[in-house]
Image (cartoon, rainbow, N blue to C red):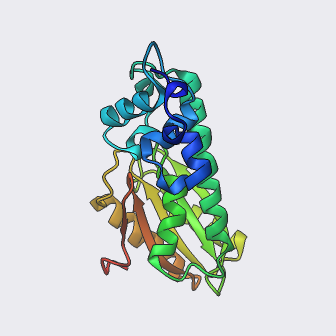
């Protein structure tokens, strides 16, 4: 039975219009974007199956195209639809974070950087550059690839900070594996960058390691 055969009060789109998006389950929201199921399977049933196979909504949206299309009924068109929806949500969260007068807590910075880096399939090292009031100047992605002492150069960090006339910085990089526990290399490069920026009186407020739906803060662990 397709969704069109369901009672009107049970259809996801009609429920959203009458009750609001917040009352819909993850599967119902996904079904609205998927639009169709396949061969006797409704969009809601397909969404439930996909969530079950992926393990979570975040894991499903974080899949590569190759992994996503191994789910029966999921093709590249549906992958593109969901990634576009995800990117709109990420940009909305980014705009809201940048509109704040200041990123004055690890939680505020975490929200912004989680939205920006948490979905990447490759490792990225980024700088969140702040002014003297800790307002966002810009987010700059400096390095891609394995984040270790051989690939992250403190002089490039200093050059970028000086160019932006930043007064403080938050370091951030993601772990595509989803595990956000910092490595010894992460701690070593953080100390090198902190020492280099101290020479130009720029503070490192935090280093955030971004995983899938989780984040580790160096500041909260007392490592800075």
Q: How many marks?
A: 0
Residue 14, position in %: x, y?
59, 42
Q: Is residue 147 left or right of residue 163?
A: left
Q: Position of residue 112 (x, y in %)?
A: 54, 65
Q: Up-down: is 152 above or below 193?
A: above
Residue 193 in the image, given as x and y percentages of width and height: 47, 70
At x 64% / y 67%, what residue is drawn?
Answer: 96
Instruction: Work out whether 198 lies above or below 84.
Output: below
Residue 175: in sight, yes or no? yes
- In the picture as drawn, the residue positioned furthest to the top comes out as 39
Question: Which of the pair 64/140 is nearer the observer?
Answer: 64
The residue that appears at 51% across and 20% down in the rendered structure is 75
| Quarter placement of the N terminus | top left
Q: Quadrant of residue 8?
A: top right
Rendered location of residue 220, percent (x, y): 34, 78
Identity of the residue drawn at 45% across and 19% down: 73
Is 168 drawn above or below residue 147 in the view shown?
A: below
On the image, which quarter does residue 130 sit in? bottom right
Q: Residue at x 45, y 76 (%)?
A: 106
Evaluate whether residue 62 shows in this view.
no
State the residue in front, 38 or 67: 38
- Where, quadrant-wise, is the C terminus in this rendering? bottom left
- In the image, 131: left or right of 36? right
In this rendering, is residue 218 above or below 70? below
């Amino acid at each position: 039975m397709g969704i069109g055969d369901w009672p009107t009060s049970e259809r996801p789109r009609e429920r959203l219009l009458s009750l609001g998006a917040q009352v819909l389950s993850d599967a119902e929201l996904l079904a609205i974007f998927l639009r169709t199921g396949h061969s006797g399977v409704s969009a809601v049933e397909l969404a439930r199956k996909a969530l079950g196979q992926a393990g979570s909504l975040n894991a499903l949206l974080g899949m590569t195209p190759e992994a996503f299309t191994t789910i029966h009924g999921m093709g590249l068109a549906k992958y593109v639809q969901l990634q576009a929806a995800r990117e709109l949500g990420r940009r909305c969260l980014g705009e809201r974070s940048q509109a704040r007068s200041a990123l004055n807590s690890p939680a505020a910075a975490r929200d912004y950087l989680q939205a920006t880096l948490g979905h990447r399939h490759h490792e990225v090292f980024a700088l969140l550059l702040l002014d003297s009031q800790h307002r966002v100047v810009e987010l700059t992605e400096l390095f891609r690839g394995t984040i270790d002492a051989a690939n992250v150069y403190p002089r490039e960090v200093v050059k970028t900070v000086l160019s932006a006339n930043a007064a403080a910085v938050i370091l951030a990089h993601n772990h595509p594996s989803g595990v956000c526990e910092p490595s010894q290399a992460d701690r070593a490069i953080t100390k090198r960058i902190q020492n280099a920026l101290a020479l130009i009186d720029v503070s490192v407020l935090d280093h955030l390691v971004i995983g899938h739906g989780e984040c580790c803060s160096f500041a909260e662990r007392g490592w800075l």
